[in-house]
Amino acid sequence: MLNRRLLLASPTLLALPAAAQTWPARPIRIIVPYPAGQTADILGRVIAERLTTALGQQVIVENKPGAGGTIGVDVAAKAAPDGYTLVVITISTHIIAPAVYPRLPYDPVKDFAPIVNVAQTPQTLITSPKSGIGSVKELIEKAKAGDLNFGSSGNGSAAHLAVELMLHAAGIRMTHVPFKGNADAQMALQSGDIQLMADAIPAIVGPIRAGKIQAIGVCDSRRSAYLPDAPTVAEQGFPSVIAVGSVGIGAPANTPASILDRLAAEMQRMLGEPAMLDKLKSLYFVPAGESLGQYGRFISSEIVRWREIVQAAGVKVE
């Protein structure tokens, strides 16, 4: 009798399973916290297209850029946890942002249910052939001999912190020059205005093949299949310099478990499809695949690691 009274007094307990059983009954949105055309947006649209087929309901992308991705993520955090709002999760929005923004409007752990880590790509240290820096050893020698500049897309970005991680590990200093975006920084690198930067592999394969820039160190424990001739920073004596970006999908916290399970299953199936693997390869991404609990633990552990990096580098964003 007591259990029946509790159920009658709590209609939410009855409503959630019913909603989950009928889900999805209307279109679903994936919030991409970046402008259209960026890699995270392209990947979000690929996922939306395939989920539309898998779920039998329209899945649309909604771009909400600004403040390093935190504006769109905050919108997702405050959305109803009913399975009709998903969000693209990146290293910048959920792992680095908590360490560099003192007043972040959302909690990347408590406010979200990570569903699946779709793909990864390591940051890579790059220089211009004009710089005379063709290896990490040469970078350190030149940095100790005189003032060098490095660029990135603003303070606290993944590209910025990848270089800070390298500088800290090597015990050297360089002057940081922030740009509006990594594309602007890359132009400055090619012209010789800066001597070093880091960027994700999808953004540098083309310029490297054209001979405009060169990769001196991949920030991962293993070489990239897309840049097989580029050594890792670890190979060059600095195994702690690991900066691997990721792009995944999450939902607001308290989204019904049955909906999260369905989405995780569909996306895991998607990541095994040859067409999806070919698409990730065309974007120079490495398929990831951590799902639900695994993905959540990955985010939590990376937040701790990057907070230590940010504190060591003294990076703050007001």
Image (cartoon, rainbow, N blue to C red):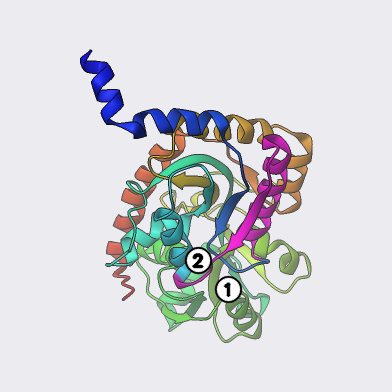
Q: Position of residue 186 (x, y in %)?
A: 62, 76
**Circle 2: is it few (<14), some (14-19), or many (20+) Cα within 10 Å?**
many
Q: Nearer the viewer, residue 201 or 139?
A: 201
Q: Nearer the viewer, residue 185 or 9?
A: 9
Q: What is the magenta range?
A: 38-67
Residue sitting at the far left: 2
Quadrant for residue 77, please give it: bottom left
SS at circle 1: helix
Q: Position of residue 241 (x, y in %)?
A: 44, 54
Pointer 2 with pointer 1, Cβ within 8 A: yes
Q: Is 119 positioned to the left or the right of 211 in the image?
A: left
- How far is the residue under mark 2 from the one under mark 1? 8 Å
Looking at the figure, which quarter contains the C terminus? Answer: bottom left
Q: Is residue 53 magenta?
A: yes
Main SS of the magenta segment?
A: helix
SS at circle 2: helix
- Residue type for callout 2: Ala
Q: Earlier in the sequence, mark 2 or mark 1?
A: 2
Which numbered dot is residue 182? 1
Tally of numbered tags: 2
Name the residue rendered at 36%, 55% in the picture: 306
Q: Is residue 78 above or below residue 171?
A: above
Name the residue rendered at 39%, 56% in the picture: 78
Whether residue 265 can be seen here:
yes
Q: Nearer the viewer, residue 180 or 239?
A: 180
Which numbered dot is residue 209? none
- Residue type for callout 1: Asn
User: Where does label 2 land, which residue?
Assistant: 159
